[in-house]
Amino acid sequence: MKASKSSGPLIITGLVLLLLILHQDNWFWTDATLVFGFIPIALFWHACISLAAVATWFLATRIAWPVSDEFEDQEGGE
């Protein structure tokens, strides 16, 4: 499913706002649970947030980044 060009920036904005909200992990500050037996859950949470940020940036470049007509002509685009 391909997002329309007008909804792309809105989707990216929503994902960034979601990441900002999820980054505030007050619920893990006092939790001593270990993930995979050695990673504190707060550190694991931040690693997952970092991977989600990578995915969001990738989507931002694929969905919302403007592509000039000149570049498309050189690459044989539509």
Image (cartoon, rainbow, N blue to C red):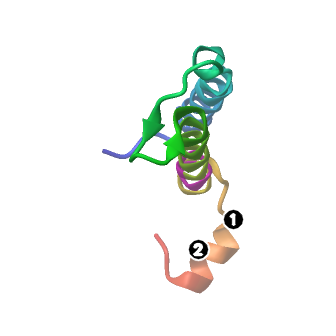
Residue at the location (67% across, 55% down)? 66
Asked whether the viewer can see residue 61, the reply is: yes
Badge 2 crowding class, 10 Å Cα cut-off, few under 14, some 14 to 19, many 20 or more, is few
In percent of the image, x 52 and y 46: which residue is there?
A: 39
Between 78 and 42, the one nearer to me in the picture: 42
Q: Specify the label residue 20 is tagged with.
A: none
In the rendered image of this protein, does residue 54 appear above or below residue 27? below
Q: Amino acid at mark 1?
A: Ser
Q: Is residue 62 above or below residue 45?
A: below
x%, y% of residue 12? 59, 36
User: Does the rendering let one see residue 5?
Assistant: no
The residue indicated by pointer 1 is 68
Q: Look at the image and say whether residue 63 sits in the magenta stretch.
A: no
Q: Quadrant of residue 11?
A: top right
Q: Depth check: give the residue in front, 47 or 52.
A: 47
Name the residue beneath numbered marker 2.
Answer: 72
In the rendering, at what x and y percent does residue 71 appear? 66, 75
Q: Residue furthest left?
A: 1
Task: Tell me if label 1 and label 2 are in contact, CB under 8 Å.
Answer: yes
Where residue 37 appears, as percent x and y from the top left, is: 41, 46
Magenta range is: 55-59
Q: Is residue 41 left or right of residue 60?
A: left
> What residue is rendered at 65% in x and 21% in y?
29
Q: Secondary structure at mark 1?
A: loop
